[in-house]
Image (cartoon, rainbow, N blue to C red):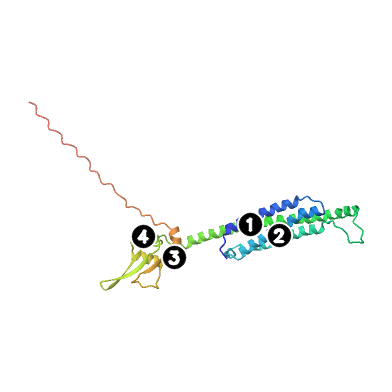
Amino acid sequence: MPPIHLTEQAQELRNLAHEFEALRDRVRGVSYTPGTDALRQIGPLLLTTQDLTATLLVRLGALANSPYTRTPGSHASLECLSSLALASTLAGDDLASALHANPLEGAAFPGYPAYSESDRVARHATAIPRMTGHLNDAAHQLDLSATGCHYVATGINSDLADTQANRVKSGRQTAGPALSPAQYDALKALSAGEGKLYESPRRGLGVTRVVTHDGNRVSIATYRALVKRRLVTADTSTSLWHGQKITVTEQGQRSQAQHRPHPVTPPAVTPPAVAAPVPAAPRAQKARR
């Protein structure tokens, strides 16, 4: 089953609620004359109710078979949708009951007396209150269905907001100490992919080095600090001589997104001392002749 977007599901439920409300208003405002006219007016309302019930079951099935079931609070939403399936079904039952109470016209069997006008009027007088009661009950169940869809849609959005807030809060708690500028730059460069950990012989000793995707090197001390904090990991299934691929972990991605490097405070610059001006020696006055 393809993944579902819960925000879209919430919007679909709101759309379904509006359809239930529109149908409720149609049921409340239906005008009919008992007999064939009532069948023509009420029959489409019953078919629409059945269509909306089928749509509701599709929404319920999509949510019940999705990761939403692991979201705290989802149980109440699913239980509510399940009860709405009953409410919309009862609305259909009420509309069908109204049609069952509707007196249709037709010819009697041969040998039986035909229905008189007074019989027809009496049947209509008996049927109208019963049909009105069933229509009112149907409108009530449709109103419950609309209200419930709005409630579940709001609940889904609220559950998603709470889950997101908890993730952010949890991420802040587990982020750990802030990254140094060198660690932040190294993590950012390794996030681009294709970073590798190598070991090359030099003077008979193995020298380990880290190279990013663009050929720049990362200090091995910085790399080991990232490994210690589980922000990066290397693919040990390959040899160091060929290079082990470095991957930024999910924790590393969160740390990069949440942390900013420590600001480097520039050293205080003391302005150079300005020597006081030396007064010029007074000119010797010429001797008076």
Cα separation, mark 1 vs mark 3, equals: 37 Å
Residue 132 in view here: no
Question: What is the secondary structure assignment of the residue under circle 3?
Answer: loop
Residue 199 in view here: yes
Label 4: few (<14), some or many (≥20) within 10 Å?
some
In the rendered image, residue 6, in percent from the top left (x then y), is placed at: 58, 59
Mark 4 vs mark 3: in front: 3
Q: Amino acid at mark 1?
A: Leu
Taking 185 as reference, is 138 left or right? right
Question: Label 4, on which residue?
Answer: 182
Residue placed most toward the observer, 140 or 56? 56
Q: Amino acid at mark 2?
A: Gln
Q: Quadrant of the C terminus?
A: top left
Mark toward the start of the polypeptide (2 vs 1): 1
Cα separation, mark 4 vs mark 3, equals: 18 Å
Question: Label 2, on which residue?
Answer: 50
Residue placed most toward the observer, 199 or 261? 199
Question: What is the secondary structure assignment of the residue under circle 1?
Answer: helix
The disc at residue 198 is none
Mark toward the start of the polypeptide (1 vs 3): 1
Question: Label 3, on which residue?
Answer: 249
Label 3: few (<14), some or many (≥20) within 10 Å?
some
Residue placed most toward the observer, 188 or 255? 188
Mark toward the start of the polypeptide (2 vs 3): 2
Q: Residue at x 67, y 61 (%)?
A: 54
Q: Amino acid at mark 3?
A: Thr
Cα separation, mark 4 vs mark 2, equals: 64 Å
Q: Residue at x 72, y 53 (%)?
A: 24
Cα separation, mark 2 vs mark 3, equals: 50 Å
Residue placed most toward the observer, 195 or 258? 195
| Discs 4, 1 touching: Cβ within 8 Å | no
